[in-house]
Image (cartoon, rainbow, N blue to C red):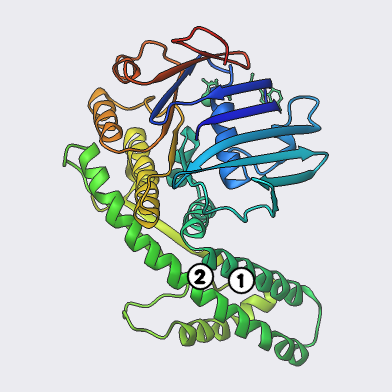
């Protein structure tokens, strides 16, 4: 990404920034706007924030509109992406074409690592499902469509279960919805499992590298429709389970089988990291998942995605910090690193070759030029 322009976005009234093609270090005190800046980059790429699903929050107080514009380079070409938000209306324009939200999910990929990513490990299955869904959607648009269809069917099926119908009528009405639920559900499960296998292939070596080959990470898909056998007929299994759960579903008025209930198990040295790992181990595992995501995008596109690393150094010991720098130096991704510690020696080492910005209450300054950007 070459440049970014913000208007009324979070605490930025109006700001233009020109970035370095490799490493951009964004420093500044707490609450000055470092995360806001990378949030804008992420928003341009994903048309959604990684901190909130409520666009309203992104508009500078009193919160009625915002505008973000970014110039991206892709295969020798440059593309101008503009997003404006006004009173709940979102307008996305790429070059001169109007686009629908999420339509360009695969075009200018970014991967963010933020302190909240610890929640992927620490929280319940819903957070991990969100991570998997976004990850797989960005690699495979077909998955995104299938997931949407699955959720539409799920919604209708749950609505039906809530209507007070006699048993015979209900069973009849459920039939076509069951077929669609199984159909889309099995595709979602199949693609998720495949992607998690590939994700683990990338996450495991990065995690080992970060821990000096001392610890081992593994990932496992926990499905509500699953079998020990590799070639089991998922559709058949899904149908059997739906029949088995029929009574409970009617009593509870909700669908109780399917990928909307599945989970990803993150295991460090054969122990469930959610229950047994330290804070630093969890953060390392979360970073490994994000780097693996980036690596998969690299393999798909032949180009690293933009890496947004928010406060990546906090809570890591010096060895891990060193290994992160070493890793970042070895790839040709454009990276954005935020830090509230101005003189972090590891960052200073990097800063010599690249660009450092200082953020002060919604104003970005290029440290070397001394000017506000
Ligand atoms: N919609 C908004 N309008 C105006 N200001 C906002 C809005 N949302 C957040 N802010 C302000 O943005 C600031 C927080 O910015 P940000 O999260 O980027 O800080 P930071 O530099 O990353 O801090 P830290 O080092 O603590 O992570 C706060 O001062 C907050 O009041
Ligand atoms: Mg921050």
Name the residue at the left extreme: 213
Residue 111 shows in this picture: yes
Question: Can you tell which quarter of the image residue 147 is in?
Answer: bottom right
Image location (x, y in percent) of residue 126: 54, 54
Residue 9 shows in this picture: no
Q: Quadrant of the C terminus?
A: top right
Q: Are marks 1 and 2 in contact (CB under 8 Å)?
A: yes
Q: Secondary structure at mark 1?
A: helix
Residue 356 vs 326, above or below: the answer is: above
- Left or right of 174? Residue 179 is left
Of callouts 1 and 2, the N-terminal one: 1
Q: State how far apart marks 1 and 2 are (Cα).
A: 8 Å
* Closer to the camera in the image, 201 or 155: 201
- Left or right of 72? Residue 328 is left
Q: Which residue is mark 1?
A: 150
Residue at 28% over, 25% down? 317
Name the residue at the top extreme: 370
Residue at 17% over, 37% down? 212
Q: Secondary structure at mark 2?
A: helix
Residue 104 vs 278, above or below: the answer is: below
**Marker disc for residue 188:** 2
């Amino acid at each position: 990404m070459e440049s970014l322009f913000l208007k009324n976005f979070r605490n930025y009234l109006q700001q233009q920034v020109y970035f370095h093609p490799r490493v951009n270090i964004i420093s500044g005190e707490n609450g000055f706007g470092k995360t806001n800046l990378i949030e804008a980059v992420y928003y341009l790429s994903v048309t959604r924030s990684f901190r909130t699903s409520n666009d309203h929050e992104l508009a500078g107080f009193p919160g009625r509109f915002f505008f973000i514009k970014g110039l991206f380079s892709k295969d020798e070409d440059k593309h101008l992406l503009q997003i404006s938000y006004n009173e709940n209306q979102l307008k996305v324009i790429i070059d001169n074409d109007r686009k629908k939200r999420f339509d360009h999910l695969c075009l200018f990929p970014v991967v963010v690592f933020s302190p909240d990513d610890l929640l992927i490990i620490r929280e319940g299955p819903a957070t991990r499902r969100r991570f998997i869904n976004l990850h797989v959607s960005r690699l495979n648009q077909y998955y995104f469509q299938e997931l949407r269809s699955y959720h539409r069917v799920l919604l209708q099926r749950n609505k039906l279960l809530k209507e007070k119908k006699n048993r015979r009528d209900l069973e009849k009405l459920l039939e076509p919805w069951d077929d669609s639920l199984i159909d889309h559900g099995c595709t979602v499960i199949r693609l998720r499992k495949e992607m998690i296998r590939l994700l683990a292939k990338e996450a495991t070596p990065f995690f080992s590298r970060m821990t000096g080959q001392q610890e081992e990470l593994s990932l496992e898909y926990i499905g509500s429709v699953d079998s020990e056998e590799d070639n089991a007929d998922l559709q058949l299994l899904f149908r059997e389970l739906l029949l088995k759960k029929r009574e409970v579903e009617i009593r509870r008025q909700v669908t109780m089988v399917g990928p909307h209930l599945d989970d990803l198990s993150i295991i460090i040295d054969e122990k469930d990291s959610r229950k047994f790992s330290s804070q630093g181990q969890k953060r390392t595992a979360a970073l490994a998942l994000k780097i693996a995501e980036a690596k998969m995008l690299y393999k798909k596109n032949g180009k690293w995605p933009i890496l947004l690393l928010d406060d990546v150094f906090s809570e890591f010991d010096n060895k891990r910090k060193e290994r992160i720098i070493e890793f970042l130096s070895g790839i040709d991704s454009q990276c954005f690193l935020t830090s509230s510690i101005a003189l972090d020696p590891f960052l200073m080492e990097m800063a010599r070759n690249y660009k450092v910005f200082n953020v002060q209450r919604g104003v970005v300054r290029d440290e070397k030029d001394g000017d506000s950007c």
